[in-house]
Amino acid sequence: MEHLKNRYGHLRDLLAEVANAAGGQTVTLEGRAYRRLWSRVDDRRVRLGGLANVRVLDLESGKYINVTHAEDAAFWEWAIVEVLRHSGVRIEEALELTHLSIRQYQRPNGEVIALLVVAPSKSDRERVIPMSAELFAVIAAIVRRHTTGGQTIPLLPRYDPKERQSSAPMPFLFQRKIGTKHEVMSDATVVNMLKRHCVELAEQHPGFLATSFTPHDFRRLLATELVNSGLPIHIGAALLGHLNLQTTRGYVAVFNEDVVRHYQGFLDRRRQARPTDEYRPVTEPEWLGFEEHFDQRKVELGGCGRPYSTPCRHEHACLRCPMININPRMLPRLDEIEVDLLARRARAEAEGWLGELEGIDLTLSLFRQKRDQTRRLARVAPVDLGIPGIAPPLPDSRDGSL
C-alpha cells in the first residue's frame, strides 16, 4: 500500500510541475531531472481546443514517460487498493459501487456518519458499511476526479462475466477514460495490476518474487485487523456480509497472545462491574460447606445434580427427582426396587389406601422412565475406529490395468 501511495504522490506532483512547463524545459522533482517533451501533435491538439498529454524524458534513466497516462493509472491503482483494504468488500462489490452508494446517516446526537451501501454479491442481502475517515477520503477523491470542472459522473453499463449480461447505465465509481471512451474497470484489470506491482516491489524486496496478492487478500487482512482490535466477531461478520460466523472465523488469523490478552481484558472489565464482596477471601466454614455439599450428592443409585447451596425440593424422594443421575451399574438394584414398589401397591390396593396407591403409581411411572433412560445409556459403547493404514495406490490407466 505504501508503494502505491508513494508512486501516485510522485506522479501527481510531477504532473502538476510539468503541466505549466514549456517544451524542452527541464523540471527537477525530488532530486530527479525531467525534460518536457513537445511535438506537432501537441500543437494540433491545443489549436483544436484540447489538452496535450504531458510527456517527459527522465534525464537520469533515459526513459520516456507519458505523465498524464501514468498519473491516471497510478491514481486508480491506489484508489482500488485503498477501498478494498478499508472496506473489506469483494472485488465485484467494489467495482459495482456507484455514486448512489454514498449515503449519510444522522445520529440522535446530531453527528453525521458517512455510509457506503454495498450491493449484494454472494448473498441476496444488501449491507451498509460505516465509512472510516480513510475510506471516506478515498471515495471523496474518486468523486472529485470524476466531477472536475462541474462535470457529472458518466452513466455506463457494466458487463458481468459471471452472469453474462450488462447492467443498466449507472454512475459507477471505478470507471476510466481510455482514449475517447469511458469504460468500467474489470476484475482481471485489478488482478493484473496487483501482479505487476509485486514484480516492481521485487526489485527492492526479493521476497515479493514468490508473492502474489489477490483482491480477496485485503478482505482477509481487514477481518483479522478488526477482530484482533477487539471488535466482536458477529459485528465483523455483518460488515463483511457473512451469513455464517464460521466463515468469518476462517478469514481471521488470531494469534494465541491476542486471544489471551482480549480475554484477560474482558475478565478485568467484568470483575470491576460486579460487587467487591463477591471477590473476598473464602472463609474456612464456607469451604467446608462447599466440600460437604458434593459429598452429600452421592446417593445409593448414583449422583445428585442439585446445584450448590440449594435444598432438596423432593425431600430426598430420589426416584421422583429429575436431578438424579442413575449409575448403569445399579440396574439390578432398580429391579429390586420395582418388586418392592409392586408389593406395596398390592398391599395398598387390598387395604383401600387410595392416597398411598396414587403416590405409588406416580413413583412407578417416573421410576420406569429413569430405568429406560439408564438402559439406553448403558447400551452406548465406544466405537472402534480401527488403526489407520496406508491405502494401496490406484491403478494407472496408462498401463492397461483398467
Image (cartoon, rainbow, N blue to C red):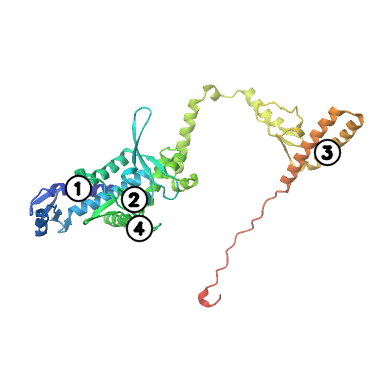
Q: Amino acid at mark 3?
A: Glu
The answer to which of marks 3 and 2 sits earlier in the sequence is 2
**Do the residues bearing badges 4 and 1 touch, measured as CB atoms within 8 Å?**
no
Q: Which amino acid type corresponds to the residue marked 4 in the rendered image?
A: Ala
Distance of mark 3 from mark 4, alpha carbons? 75 Å
Residue that mark 3 sits on: 338
Tell me if label 3 and label 2 are in contact, CB under 8 Å. no
Lateral position of residue 98 relative to residue 378, left or right:
left
Percent x, y for residue 297?
71, 32
How many numbered circles does the render carry?
Answer: 4
Residue at 47 percent across and 38 percent down: it is 260
Label 1 – label 2 distance at C-alpha: 24 Å
Q: Nearer the viewer, mark 3 or mark 2?
A: 2
Q: Residue furthest right?
A: 350
User: Which comes sooner in the sequence, label 3 or label 4?
Assistant: 4
Rate crowding at label 3 as few (under 14), some (14 to 19) or many (20 or more) other CA atoms within 10 Å. Answer: some
The residue carrying mark 1 is 12
Q: Which residue is mark 2?
A: 95
Q: Earlier in the sequence, mark 4 or mark 2?
A: 2
Q: Nearer the viewer, mark 3 or mark 4?
A: 3
Can you see residue 66? yes
**Disc 4 marks which residue?**
210
Q: Which-is-in-front pick, marks 4 and 1?
A: 1
Disc 3 from disc 2: Cα separation: 75 Å
